[in-house]
Amino acid sequence: MVDFGGWELPQQYTSIRDEHLAVRKVAGLFDISHMGRFRVTGAEAFDFLQRLLTNDLSRIGPGRAQYNLMCNEQGGILDDLVVYWGEDAFIVVVNAANRERDLEWMQGHVPTGVAIEDRTVELALIALQGPKAEELLPAGGLGDLPYFGFRPAKVAGVGALVSRTGYTGEDGFELFVDSERVGDVWDAILESGTPAGVLPAGLGARDATRLEAALRLYGNDMDESVNPYEAGLGWTVKPAKGDFIGNQALRKVKADGPKRMLVGLQTSPGDIARHGTAVLRRGAKVGNVTSGTHSFFLGHPIALAMVEVASLRVGESAAVELRGREASAEVVELPFYRGSARSAAAPAKS
């Protein structure tokens, strides 16, 4: 068990390797109740979120979710999040470490008539992720649920809000369940799925699978010093929708071009480049690793790195500075792995 954003979470239940492979081959069950969950209501809730976030909510509707960014006036990323458009409210799921700061920021911009309720404690969140998640989830009638769609359902006889989202690159479901009943749902999923190979999965497997899918981690791959275009998330910025916080600054970044970019690196077994590791090109530093781990599924270490624009291109050689020596690295295409998730165009976040 480790501290994560003020929550005590499992790094692993059995082994990171076994849990990682379960997610890729069958399914893994994650407890992600540390993520912040806000309920936004009021006649002006839609307009409020449109002004607060970079993406265009008018492109979806009730029963659909959207990946989004919340930026400051300078275009720096305050958080990445998912907005769920419900029949009577919007649910906004944010990163655990940013929950209190996000809530304060949102409340500082909320207009009269819009209410923001923090439901993190009362409403638990778990995720079943993997290519066999649909057949192994003890709930019927979800086969036609689209990617980034959600609706109420009974899971093991317990009422839940089920979304087809995730943070692993695989197909799967995230389940919003009353905190008093989530233990029953968790146990039922494991009881029905264990014979097929479903395992409870911790932070280690979660980090490895999201990195294989090149899904960004706030605090590592992006923060307030990084803008969406540098993070490779410029597709979430929709200036044409109207004014929003950071709009003018991001228009300038797009016009001028970002000065940095995220690239994928592959290194030899044993040469694991962690967050902060220097990235070199012909002996000169061009950036730093933002996320790195060993991929049990791919069989070698992988990393994301923030580097100077045009300093490294796919197929070129680079180096990472490990314990006083230079280890060779290859610049590779992202994502490192394409799984069973139904759309690569809208990366999920959990």
Image (cartoon, rainbow, N blue to C red):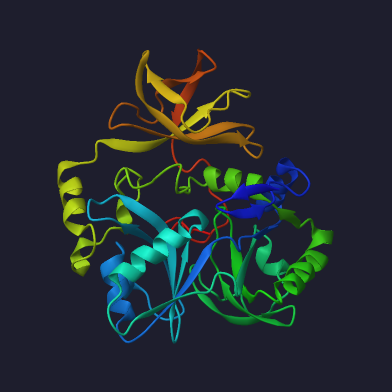
Q: Quadrant of residue 230?
A: top left
Q: Relative to 126, is 297 above or below?
A: above
Write the residue at 33% across / 37% down. Answer: 261
Q: Relative to 309, is 35 above or below?
A: below
Write the residue at 29% across / 66% down. Answer: 52
User: Where does the image place residue 319, in percent across and percent down from the top left?
Assistant: 45, 19
Tell me, yes or no, if residue 168 can be seen here.
Answer: yes
Q: Nearer the viewer, residue 234 or 108?
A: 108
Q: Nearer the viewer, residue 107 or 273?
A: 107
User: Where does the image place residue 314, in percent across and percent down from the top left?
Assistant: 39, 31
Write the residue at 15% across / 48% down. Answer: 252
User: Where does the image place residue 235, in percent across and percent down from the top left?
Assistant: 31, 55
Q: Relative to 142, is 26 above or below?
A: above
User: Where does the image place residue 50, in percent across and percent down from the top left?
Assistant: 28, 71
Q: Quadrant of residue 225?
A: top left
- Compared across the picture, whether 175 is left or right of 16 comes to left
Q: Relative to 119, is 15 above or below?
A: above
Q: Nearer the viewer, residue 97 or 64?
A: 97
- Compared across the picture, whether 44 is left or right of 88 comes to left
Q: Nearer the viewer, residue 7 or 18?
A: 7
Q: Quadrant of residue 15?
A: top right
Write the residue at 51% across / 29% down. Answer: 266
The count of marks equals 0
Tell me, yes or no, if residue 56 can be seen here.
Answer: no
- Compared across the picture, whether 281 is left or right of 27 comes to left
